[in-house]
Image: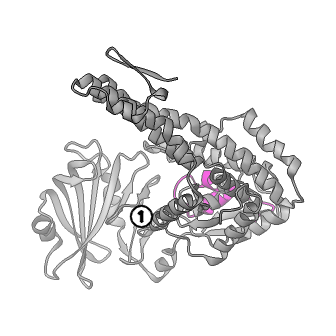
Amino acid sequence: MIAMKCSNTVISVNSVCLPELRRLDLRKPQRRRCQIAALALLSVLWLPTVVWGLSLEKEIEKGREEHQKIVAQFGIYRDERLQAYVEKVGQRLAEYSSRPELEYRFTLLNDDMINAFALPGGYVYITRGMLLHLGSEAELAAVLGHEIAHITEKHGIKRESRNKVQNALSMGAAMLTGQRGVAELGQLLGGVLITGYSREFELEADEVGAAYMAQAGYSPKAMLKTIDILKNKDRVEIKQAKAEQRPARVYHGFLSSHPDNDTRYREAVIASDALLNDFDAFIRTDEFLQQLNGLSFGPSRQTGIVRGKRFYHAKLGLTLALPPGWRQNQVPRGVQFVSQTGEAAFELSTSRVKRDVTPEAFAKSVLGYQIREGRSLTIDGMPAYIAIADRAQSMFGVRPVRLIVAIDRRRGIAFVGQGSGQFDLKKIADDADFIRIGFSIAKMSKADFAKARPLKVQIVRAERDTTMAGLAELSDLTNYAEDQLRVINGLYPNGEPEPGQLIKIID
Protein backbone atom coordinates (compact mmCIF):
# COMPACT_ATOMS: atom_id res chain seq x y z
CA MET A 1 0.00 0.00 0.00
CA ILE A 2 1.21 3.53 -0.79
CA ALA A 3 0.10 6.26 1.59
CA MET A 4 0.40 10.03 1.38
CA LYS A 5 -0.08 12.49 4.18
CA CYS A 6 -1.37 15.98 3.43
CA SER A 7 -1.78 18.08 6.57
CA ASN A 8 -3.87 15.77 8.79
CA THR A 9 -5.35 13.77 5.90
CA VAL A 10 -3.89 10.36 5.02
CA ILE A 11 -4.81 8.82 1.67
CA SER A 12 -4.04 5.20 0.82
CA VAL A 13 -3.55 5.49 -2.92
CA ASN A 14 -4.15 1.88 -3.86
CA SER A 15 -7.44 1.85 -1.94
CA VAL A 16 -8.82 5.15 -3.24
CA CYS A 17 -10.74 5.36 -6.48
CA LEU A 18 -11.19 8.54 -8.48
CA PRO A 19 -14.77 9.22 -7.29
CA GLU A 20 -13.61 9.13 -3.68
CA LEU A 21 -10.85 11.59 -4.50
CA ARG A 22 -13.36 13.92 -6.09
CA ARG A 23 -15.40 13.97 -2.88
CA LEU A 24 -12.51 15.47 -0.94
CA ASP A 25 -13.09 18.96 0.42
CA LEU A 26 -11.40 21.23 -2.11
CA ARG A 27 -12.15 24.46 -0.28
CA LYS A 28 -8.76 24.42 1.39
CA PRO A 29 -5.67 24.87 -0.80
CA GLN A 30 -3.69 22.16 1.03
CA ARG A 31 -6.42 19.58 0.40
CA ARG A 32 -6.69 20.67 -3.21
CA ARG A 33 -2.96 20.07 -3.69
CA CYS A 34 -3.32 16.72 -1.94
CA GLN A 35 -6.04 15.57 -4.34
CA ILE A 36 -4.02 16.57 -7.41
CA ALA A 37 -0.92 14.88 -6.02
CA ALA A 38 -2.89 11.70 -5.39
CA LEU A 39 -4.20 11.75 -8.93
CA ALA A 40 -0.64 12.20 -10.21
CA LEU A 41 0.57 9.26 -8.14
CA LEU A 42 -2.30 7.12 -9.37
CA SER A 43 -1.20 7.89 -12.92
CA VAL A 44 2.30 6.68 -11.99
CA LEU A 45 0.91 3.31 -10.94
CA TRP A 46 -1.36 3.05 -13.99
CA LEU A 47 0.91 4.48 -16.74
CA PRO A 48 3.55 1.70 -17.10
CA THR A 49 0.87 -0.92 -17.74
CA VAL A 50 -0.68 1.18 -20.49
CA VAL A 51 2.58 2.21 -22.20
CA TRP A 52 4.46 -1.08 -21.89
CA GLY A 53 1.33 -2.85 -23.11
CA LEU A 54 1.28 -0.72 -26.27
CA SER A 55 -0.51 -2.58 -29.05
CA LEU A 56 1.50 -3.82 -32.01
CA GLU A 57 -0.38 -1.47 -34.34
CA LYS A 58 0.33 1.55 -32.12
CA GLU A 59 3.99 0.59 -31.78
CA ILE A 60 4.42 0.31 -35.55
CA GLU A 61 2.55 3.58 -36.07
CA LYS A 62 4.78 5.33 -33.53
CA GLY A 63 7.90 4.03 -35.30
CA ARG A 64 6.58 5.01 -38.74
CA GLU A 65 5.89 8.58 -37.62
CA GLU A 66 9.36 8.96 -36.09
CA HIS A 67 10.98 7.35 -39.12
CA GLN A 68 9.88 10.25 -41.31
CA LYS A 69 11.50 12.70 -38.89
CA ILE A 70 14.75 10.73 -38.81
CA VAL A 71 15.01 10.62 -42.60
CA ALA A 72 14.21 14.33 -42.85
CA GLN A 73 16.90 15.22 -40.30
CA PHE A 74 19.77 12.97 -41.39
CA GLY A 75 18.97 11.91 -44.95
CA ILE A 76 19.49 8.47 -46.46
CA TYR A 77 22.95 7.66 -47.82
CA ARG A 78 22.46 7.42 -51.57
CA ASP A 79 24.30 4.21 -52.36
CA GLU A 80 21.88 1.41 -53.29
CA ARG A 81 24.61 -1.23 -53.19
CA LEU A 82 25.67 -0.35 -49.65
CA GLN A 83 22.06 0.09 -48.48
CA ALA A 84 21.28 -3.40 -49.80
CA TYR A 85 24.30 -4.85 -48.02
CA VAL A 86 23.27 -3.38 -44.65
CA GLU A 87 19.72 -4.62 -45.23
CA LYS A 88 20.98 -8.13 -46.03
CA VAL A 89 23.00 -8.40 -42.83
CA GLY A 90 20.15 -6.94 -40.78
CA GLN A 91 17.55 -9.32 -42.18
CA ARG A 92 19.82 -12.29 -41.52
CA LEU A 93 19.83 -11.31 -37.85
CA ALA A 94 16.12 -10.45 -37.79
CA GLU A 95 15.25 -14.04 -38.73
CA TYR A 96 16.20 -15.01 -35.16
CA SER A 97 14.39 -12.12 -33.48
CA SER A 98 12.09 -12.99 -30.60
CA ARG A 99 9.45 -10.78 -32.23
CA PRO A 100 8.92 -12.23 -35.73
CA GLU A 101 5.62 -10.36 -36.04
CA LEU A 102 7.58 -7.16 -36.77
CA GLU A 103 8.77 -6.15 -40.22
CA TYR A 104 12.35 -4.92 -39.70
CA ARG A 105 13.78 -2.10 -41.80
CA PHE A 106 17.48 -1.19 -41.85
CA THR A 107 18.54 2.26 -43.04
CA LEU A 108 22.02 3.68 -43.66
CA LEU A 109 21.93 7.38 -42.78
CA ASN A 110 24.07 10.04 -44.47
CA ASP A 111 25.73 11.37 -41.32
CA ASP A 112 29.38 11.28 -40.27
CA MET A 113 28.67 11.00 -36.54
CA ILE A 114 29.28 7.57 -35.01
CA ASN A 115 25.78 6.43 -34.21
CA ALA A 116 23.27 3.59 -34.44
CA PHE A 117 19.81 3.49 -32.92
CA ALA A 118 16.38 1.90 -33.21
CA LEU A 119 12.76 2.96 -33.09
CA PRO A 120 9.78 0.94 -31.91
CA GLY A 121 8.10 -1.11 -34.60
CA GLY A 122 11.24 -2.51 -36.25
CA TYR A 123 13.15 0.54 -37.51
CA VAL A 124 16.95 0.25 -37.23
CA TYR A 125 19.47 2.91 -38.27
CA ILE A 126 23.23 3.07 -38.68
CA THR A 127 25.22 6.08 -39.88
CA ARG A 128 28.00 5.98 -42.44
CA GLY A 129 30.21 7.39 -39.68
CA MET A 130 29.62 4.22 -37.68
CA LEU A 131 30.11 2.03 -40.74
CA LEU A 132 33.50 3.67 -41.36
CA HIS A 133 34.75 2.53 -37.96
CA LEU A 134 33.78 -1.14 -38.35
CA GLY A 135 36.20 -3.73 -39.69
CA SER A 136 34.10 -6.76 -40.60
CA GLU A 137 30.61 -7.97 -41.35
CA ALA A 138 30.55 -9.56 -37.90
CA GLU A 139 31.12 -6.13 -36.32
CA LEU A 140 28.30 -4.71 -38.43
CA ALA A 141 26.13 -7.59 -37.21
CA ALA A 142 27.10 -6.74 -33.62
CA VAL A 143 25.79 -3.18 -34.03
CA LEU A 144 22.60 -4.20 -35.84
CA GLY A 145 21.94 -7.11 -33.46
CA HIS A 146 22.31 -4.78 -30.49
CA GLU A 147 19.75 -2.38 -31.98
CA ILE A 148 17.34 -5.20 -32.87
CA ALA A 149 17.51 -6.24 -29.22
CA HIS A 150 16.52 -2.73 -28.13
CA ILE A 151 13.35 -3.23 -30.20
CA THR A 152 12.54 -6.76 -29.07
CA GLU A 153 13.05 -5.83 -25.41
CA LYS A 154 10.97 -2.65 -25.91
CA HIS A 155 13.63 -0.43 -24.36
CA GLY A 156 12.46 2.67 -26.21
CA ILE A 157 8.89 2.21 -24.97
CA LYS A 158 10.05 1.54 -21.41
CA ARG A 159 12.30 4.59 -21.45
CA GLU A 160 9.43 6.77 -22.66
CA SER A 161 7.25 5.34 -19.89
CA ARG A 162 9.85 6.11 -17.25
CA ASN A 163 10.14 9.68 -18.48
CA LYS A 164 6.40 10.12 -18.10
CA VAL A 165 6.42 8.45 -14.69
CA GLN A 166 9.18 10.76 -13.49
CA ASN A 167 7.31 13.83 -14.72
CA ALA A 168 4.19 12.68 -12.88
CA LEU A 169 6.17 12.11 -9.68
CA SER A 170 7.71 15.56 -9.98
CA MET A 171 4.30 17.15 -10.44
CA GLY A 172 2.95 15.28 -7.42
CA ALA A 173 5.86 16.36 -5.25
CA ALA A 174 5.42 19.96 -6.32
CA MET A 175 1.72 19.85 -5.47
CA LEU A 176 2.32 18.35 -2.05
CA THR A 177 4.90 20.94 -1.04
CA GLY A 178 3.50 23.89 -2.96
CA GLN A 179 7.01 24.64 -4.27
CA ARG A 180 7.66 24.78 -8.00
CA GLY A 181 11.36 24.14 -7.51
CA VAL A 182 10.63 20.59 -6.39
CA ALA A 183 9.27 19.79 -9.84
CA GLU A 184 12.48 21.02 -11.45
CA LEU A 185 14.57 19.01 -9.00
CA GLY A 186 12.43 15.98 -9.74
CA GLN A 187 13.08 16.26 -13.47
CA LEU A 188 16.80 16.63 -12.85
CA LEU A 189 16.79 13.59 -10.57
CA GLY A 190 14.67 11.76 -13.11
CA GLY A 191 17.36 12.26 -15.73
CA VAL A 192 19.89 10.66 -13.41
CA LEU A 193 17.56 7.75 -12.69
CA ILE A 194 16.88 7.13 -16.35
CA THR A 195 20.57 7.37 -17.15
CA GLY A 196 21.18 4.77 -14.46
CA TYR A 197 18.84 2.37 -16.24
CA SER A 198 20.63 2.89 -19.54
CA ARG A 199 23.46 0.57 -18.51
CA GLU A 200 20.94 -2.16 -17.71
CA PHE A 201 19.26 -1.65 -21.07
CA GLU A 202 22.60 -1.60 -22.89
CA LEU A 203 23.80 -4.80 -21.22
CA GLU A 204 20.51 -6.52 -21.95
CA ALA A 205 20.76 -5.44 -25.58
CA ASP A 206 24.34 -6.77 -25.68
CA GLU A 207 23.26 -10.13 -24.28
CA VAL A 208 20.19 -10.55 -26.48
CA GLY A 209 21.96 -9.15 -29.55
CA ALA A 210 24.88 -11.55 -29.05
CA ALA A 211 22.45 -14.46 -29.09
CA TYR A 212 20.93 -13.23 -32.36
CA MET A 213 24.44 -12.93 -33.82
CA ALA A 214 25.45 -16.45 -32.85
CA GLN A 215 22.26 -17.99 -34.25
CA ALA A 216 22.82 -16.09 -37.50
CA GLY A 217 26.39 -17.43 -37.76
CA TYR A 218 28.37 -14.42 -36.54
CA SER A 219 30.87 -14.73 -33.72
CA PRO A 220 29.53 -12.86 -30.65
CA LYS A 221 33.13 -11.99 -29.79
CA ALA A 222 32.95 -9.43 -32.61
CA MET A 223 30.77 -7.43 -30.23
CA LEU A 224 33.75 -7.13 -27.87
CA LYS A 225 35.89 -5.89 -30.75
CA THR A 226 33.21 -3.37 -31.74
CA ILE A 227 33.04 -1.94 -28.23
CA ASP A 228 36.84 -1.64 -28.15
CA ILE A 229 36.81 0.31 -31.44
CA LEU A 230 34.13 2.69 -30.18
CA LYS A 231 35.92 3.21 -26.90
CA ASN A 232 39.18 3.98 -28.72
CA LYS A 233 37.32 6.49 -30.89
CA ASP A 234 35.94 8.06 -27.69
CA ARG A 235 39.45 8.25 -26.24
CA VAL A 236 40.81 10.00 -29.34
CA GLU A 237 37.83 12.37 -29.45
CA ILE A 238 38.24 13.26 -25.76
CA LYS A 239 41.96 13.91 -26.31
CA GLN A 240 41.26 16.10 -29.35
CA ALA A 241 38.43 17.97 -27.62
CA LYS A 242 40.68 18.73 -24.66
CA ALA A 243 43.38 20.13 -26.96
CA GLU A 244 40.77 22.15 -28.87
CA GLN A 245 39.00 23.30 -25.68
CA ARG A 246 35.56 22.11 -26.79
CA PRO A 247 33.03 19.53 -25.55
CA ALA A 248 33.76 15.96 -26.64
CA ARG A 249 31.32 14.29 -29.04
CA VAL A 250 31.24 10.66 -27.94
CA TYR A 251 29.05 7.74 -29.01
CA HIS A 252 26.44 6.91 -26.37
CA GLY A 253 29.03 7.44 -23.60
CA PHE A 254 30.41 3.91 -24.05
CA LEU A 255 33.37 4.70 -21.82
CA SER A 256 30.93 4.83 -18.89
CA SER A 257 28.26 2.33 -19.93
CA HIS A 258 30.86 -0.33 -20.86
CA PRO A 259 33.79 0.14 -18.44
CA ASP A 260 37.12 -1.58 -18.97
CA ASN A 261 37.34 -5.20 -17.74
CA ASP A 262 33.53 -5.38 -17.49
CA THR A 263 33.17 -9.00 -16.34
CA ARG A 264 29.37 -9.11 -16.58
CA TYR A 265 29.40 -7.77 -20.12
CA ARG A 266 32.09 -10.14 -21.37
CA GLU A 267 30.48 -13.16 -19.74
CA ALA A 268 27.10 -12.31 -21.29
CA VAL A 269 28.60 -12.02 -24.77
CA ILE A 270 30.91 -15.05 -24.58
CA ALA A 271 28.06 -17.21 -23.22
CA SER A 272 26.36 -16.86 -26.59
CA ASP A 273 29.23 -18.76 -28.24
CA ALA A 274 27.36 -21.97 -27.40
CA LEU A 275 24.72 -20.99 -29.99
CA LEU A 276 27.29 -20.23 -32.70
CA ASN A 277 26.72 -21.63 -36.19
CA ASP A 278 29.42 -21.89 -38.89
CA PHE A 279 31.32 -18.64 -39.38
CA ASP A 280 34.15 -17.56 -41.68
CA ALA A 281 35.50 -14.27 -40.33
CA PHE A 282 38.35 -13.82 -42.84
CA ILE A 283 36.20 -13.96 -45.97
CA ARG A 284 33.60 -11.65 -44.52
CA THR A 285 36.26 -9.17 -43.33
CA ASP A 286 37.57 -8.67 -46.86
CA GLU A 287 34.08 -8.61 -48.36
CA PHE A 288 32.94 -6.02 -45.83
CA LEU A 289 35.91 -3.70 -46.43
CA GLN A 290 35.43 -3.89 -50.19
CA GLN A 291 31.86 -2.70 -49.66
CA LEU A 292 33.21 0.47 -48.02
CA ASN A 293 35.38 1.49 -50.97
CA GLY A 294 34.24 4.97 -52.07
CA LEU A 295 32.26 5.72 -48.88
CA SER A 296 31.87 9.47 -48.34
CA PHE A 297 33.98 10.97 -45.55
CA GLY A 298 33.19 14.04 -43.49
CA PRO A 299 30.05 16.13 -42.92
CA SER A 300 27.17 15.55 -45.33
CA ARG A 301 26.65 19.28 -45.90
CA GLN A 302 30.18 20.51 -46.46
CA THR A 303 31.10 24.01 -47.60
CA GLY A 304 34.30 23.47 -49.50
CA ILE A 305 36.95 20.92 -48.62
CA VAL A 306 40.16 21.01 -46.58
CA ARG A 307 43.01 18.87 -47.91
CA GLY A 308 46.15 18.99 -45.84
CA LYS A 309 46.71 22.68 -45.07
CA ARG A 310 44.68 24.16 -47.94
CA PHE A 311 40.99 24.92 -48.28
CA TYR A 312 39.24 24.66 -51.66
CA HIS A 313 35.83 26.06 -52.51
CA ALA A 314 34.94 24.86 -56.01
CA LYS A 315 31.74 26.90 -56.29
CA LEU A 316 33.57 30.15 -55.51
CA GLY A 317 36.69 29.07 -57.37
CA LEU A 318 38.74 30.13 -54.32
CA THR A 319 41.52 28.52 -52.30
CA LEU A 320 43.50 29.60 -49.23
CA ALA A 321 46.08 28.18 -46.83
CA LEU A 322 45.46 27.41 -43.15
CA PRO A 323 47.98 27.66 -40.28
CA PRO A 324 49.09 24.35 -38.68
CA GLY A 325 46.43 22.84 -36.42
CA TRP A 326 43.56 24.94 -37.77
CA ARG A 327 40.31 23.23 -38.76
CA GLN A 328 37.10 24.09 -40.57
CA ASN A 329 33.81 24.52 -38.72
CA GLN A 330 30.66 23.88 -40.72
CA VAL A 331 28.35 26.90 -40.29
CA PRO A 332 24.98 27.78 -41.87
CA ARG A 333 26.40 30.69 -43.88
CA GLY A 334 29.88 31.45 -45.15
CA VAL A 335 33.01 29.57 -44.14
CA GLN A 336 34.63 29.49 -40.71
CA PHE A 337 38.06 28.26 -39.58
CA VAL A 338 39.24 28.03 -35.98
CA SER A 339 42.60 27.52 -34.34
CA GLN A 340 43.42 24.30 -32.52
CA THR A 341 42.47 25.82 -29.15
CA GLY A 342 39.36 27.49 -30.54
CA GLU A 343 40.55 30.90 -29.29
CA ALA A 344 40.99 32.41 -32.76
CA ALA A 345 38.75 32.31 -35.82
CA PHE A 346 38.83 33.42 -39.44
CA GLU A 347 35.48 33.84 -41.22
CA LEU A 348 35.09 34.11 -44.98
CA SER A 349 31.97 35.41 -46.71
CA THR A 350 31.04 36.87 -50.10
CA SER A 351 28.98 39.83 -51.27
CA ARG A 352 27.88 41.20 -54.60
CA VAL A 353 29.66 44.45 -55.42
CA LYS A 354 29.39 47.11 -58.11
CA ARG A 355 32.29 47.09 -60.54
CA ASP A 356 33.42 50.64 -59.76
CA VAL A 357 33.51 50.22 -55.95
CA THR A 358 37.00 49.99 -54.44
CA PRO A 359 37.77 47.50 -51.66
CA GLU A 360 38.40 50.40 -49.25
CA ALA A 361 35.06 52.05 -50.06
CA PHE A 362 33.34 48.68 -49.72
CA ALA A 363 34.85 48.16 -46.26
CA LYS A 364 33.91 51.63 -45.03
CA SER A 365 30.62 52.36 -46.81
CA VAL A 366 29.02 48.97 -47.44
CA LEU A 367 30.25 47.09 -44.37
CA GLY A 368 30.14 50.28 -42.26
CA TYR A 369 33.25 49.46 -40.20
CA GLN A 370 35.28 51.98 -38.24
CA ILE A 371 38.69 51.43 -39.79
CA ARG A 372 42.23 51.94 -38.49
CA GLU A 373 45.59 50.94 -40.01
CA GLY A 374 44.12 50.32 -43.47
CA ARG A 375 45.99 50.09 -46.77
CA SER A 376 45.24 49.05 -50.33
CA LEU A 377 47.14 46.29 -52.13
CA THR A 378 46.68 43.40 -54.58
CA ILE A 379 46.05 39.74 -53.69
CA ASP A 380 46.45 37.22 -56.55
CA GLY A 381 45.71 39.95 -59.10
CA MET A 382 42.61 41.15 -57.28
CA PRO A 383 42.35 44.67 -55.83
CA ALA A 384 42.30 44.29 -52.08
CA TYR A 385 42.21 46.20 -48.81
CA ILE A 386 43.57 45.14 -45.42
CA ALA A 387 42.75 46.91 -42.17
CA ILE A 388 41.72 46.61 -38.56
CA ALA A 389 38.07 47.25 -37.80
CA ASP A 390 37.40 48.41 -34.24
CA ARG A 391 34.46 46.93 -32.34
CA ALA A 392 33.14 44.74 -35.14
CA GLN A 393 30.80 41.79 -34.69
CA SER A 394 32.58 38.41 -34.62
CA MET A 395 31.81 34.85 -33.51
CA PHE A 396 33.17 35.87 -30.08
CA GLY A 397 31.01 38.99 -29.86
CA VAL A 398 32.16 42.56 -30.45
CA ARG A 399 35.94 42.47 -30.97
CA PRO A 400 38.68 44.21 -32.95
CA VAL A 401 38.77 42.39 -36.30
CA ARG A 402 41.49 41.92 -38.91
CA LEU A 403 39.58 42.75 -42.07
CA ILE A 404 40.65 41.62 -45.56
CA VAL A 405 38.59 42.48 -48.64
CA ALA A 406 39.47 41.23 -52.14
CA ILE A 407 37.29 41.94 -55.19
CA ASP A 408 36.94 39.70 -58.23
CA ARG A 409 36.08 42.39 -60.81
CA ARG A 410 35.10 39.93 -63.56
CA ARG A 411 32.50 38.19 -61.41
CA GLY A 412 31.49 41.22 -59.34
CA ILE A 413 32.16 39.42 -56.04
CA ALA A 414 33.83 40.74 -52.90
CA PHE A 415 35.57 38.17 -50.70
CA VAL A 416 35.44 39.33 -47.08
CA GLY A 417 37.76 37.78 -44.51
CA GLN A 418 37.50 38.59 -40.79
CA GLY A 419 39.94 37.36 -38.15
CA SER A 420 39.14 37.69 -34.45
CA GLY A 421 40.32 36.38 -31.10
CA GLN A 422 38.26 35.26 -28.13
CA PHE A 423 40.18 37.36 -25.62
CA ASP A 424 41.21 40.32 -27.79
CA LEU A 425 40.59 43.79 -26.39
CA LYS A 426 42.45 46.26 -28.65
CA LYS A 427 45.34 44.21 -29.97
CA ILE A 428 44.76 41.11 -32.10
CA ALA A 429 46.75 38.22 -30.66
CA ASP A 430 46.67 36.01 -33.78
CA ASP A 431 47.00 38.83 -36.28
CA ALA A 432 50.01 37.25 -38.03
CA ASP A 433 47.98 34.11 -38.77
CA PHE A 434 45.05 36.16 -40.07
CA ILE A 435 47.31 38.15 -42.40
CA ARG A 436 48.93 34.95 -43.74
CA ILE A 437 45.49 33.47 -44.44
CA GLY A 438 44.39 36.63 -46.22
CA PHE A 439 47.50 36.86 -48.36
CA SER A 440 47.13 33.17 -49.34
CA ILE A 441 43.71 33.74 -50.96
CA ALA A 442 43.93 32.78 -54.63
CA LYS A 443 41.75 31.87 -57.59
CA MET A 444 41.66 28.11 -58.18
CA SER A 445 43.56 26.58 -61.08
CA LYS A 446 42.50 23.48 -63.05
CA ALA A 447 44.69 21.37 -60.79
CA ASP A 448 43.03 22.92 -57.74
CA PHE A 449 39.56 21.91 -58.96
CA ALA A 450 40.72 18.28 -59.04
CA LYS A 451 41.76 18.63 -55.39
CA ALA A 452 38.40 20.16 -54.46
CA ARG A 453 36.53 16.85 -54.79
CA PRO A 454 35.13 15.48 -51.50
CA LEU A 455 37.19 13.05 -49.44
CA LYS A 456 36.36 9.35 -49.83
CA VAL A 457 37.27 6.11 -48.10
CA GLN A 458 39.66 4.04 -50.20
CA ILE A 459 40.44 0.39 -49.51
CA VAL A 460 44.05 -0.57 -50.26
CA ARG A 461 46.28 -3.53 -49.49
CA ALA A 462 49.17 -2.96 -47.09
CA GLU A 463 52.65 -3.62 -48.39
CA ARG A 464 55.68 -4.86 -46.48
CA ASP A 465 56.88 -1.38 -45.58
CA THR A 466 53.44 0.15 -44.90
CA THR A 467 53.17 1.92 -41.54
CA MET A 468 50.42 4.01 -40.02
CA ALA A 469 52.81 6.93 -39.54
CA GLY A 470 53.74 6.78 -43.23
CA LEU A 471 50.08 6.69 -44.27
CA ALA A 472 49.37 9.67 -42.02
CA GLU A 473 52.13 11.72 -43.68
CA LEU A 474 50.57 11.12 -47.09
CA SER A 475 46.99 11.64 -45.89
CA ASP A 476 44.81 14.62 -46.73
CA LEU A 477 43.32 14.52 -43.23
CA THR A 478 43.95 17.86 -41.56
CA ASN A 479 44.53 17.06 -37.87
CA TYR A 480 45.40 13.94 -35.88
CA ALA A 481 45.70 11.96 -39.12
CA GLU A 482 47.57 9.02 -37.57
CA ASP A 483 45.11 8.70 -34.66
CA GLN A 484 42.16 8.82 -37.06
CA LEU A 485 43.64 6.21 -39.40
CA ARG A 486 44.55 3.91 -36.52
CA VAL A 487 41.04 4.06 -35.06
CA ILE A 488 39.16 3.37 -38.31
CA ASN A 489 41.48 0.41 -38.98
CA GLY A 490 41.24 -1.05 -35.47
CA LEU A 491 44.95 -0.43 -34.85
CA TYR A 492 44.82 2.17 -32.07
CA PRO A 493 47.02 3.06 -30.22
CA ASN A 494 50.13 1.47 -31.76
CA GLY A 495 49.18 -1.41 -34.06
CA GLU A 496 50.59 -1.79 -37.57
CA PRO A 497 49.00 -3.47 -40.61
CA GLU A 498 50.18 -6.87 -41.74
CA PRO A 499 51.52 -7.17 -45.32
CA GLY A 500 48.61 -8.04 -47.60
CA GLN A 501 45.97 -6.78 -45.15
CA LEU A 502 43.17 -4.60 -46.52
CA ILE A 503 43.15 -1.20 -44.81
CA LYS A 504 41.20 2.04 -45.07
CA ILE A 505 42.76 5.32 -46.11
CA ILE A 506 41.09 8.68 -46.74
CA ASP A 507 41.73 10.29 -50.12
Number of numbered tags placed on the structure image? 1
Residue 192 rendering spot, x and y as whole percentages? 49, 33
* Amino acid type indicated by mark 1: Ala
Residue 472 on the magenta segment? yes
By what rule are the colours in the image chosen? one colour
Occupied quadrant, residue 20: top left
Q: Residue at x 21, y 26 (%)?
A: 27
Q: Is 169 in front, or is 317?
A: 169
Left or right: where 278 falls relative to 225:
right
Q: Which residue occupies the extreme bottom position in the image?
A: 410
Left or right: where 144 falls relative to 242:
right
Report whether residue 341 is seen.
yes
Image position of 162 with respect to 346: above or below: above
Q: Residue at x 76, y 65 (%)?
A: 92
Q: Is 468 in front, or is 505?
A: 505
Q: Label 1 crowding class (10 Å Cα cut-off): few <14, some 14-19, many 20+?
A: many
Residue 353 rendering spot, x and y as whole percentages? 18, 77
Q: Please identify the quadrant where the C terminus is shown.
A: bottom right
Residue designated by label 1: 321
Q: Residue at x 82, y 43 (%)?
A: 270
Report whether residue 228 is seen.
no
Image position of 151 with respect to 449: above or below: above
Q: Residue at x 13, y 59 (%)?
A: 369
Q: Determine whether the residue tagged by mark 1 lies in a helix, strand or loop.
A: strand
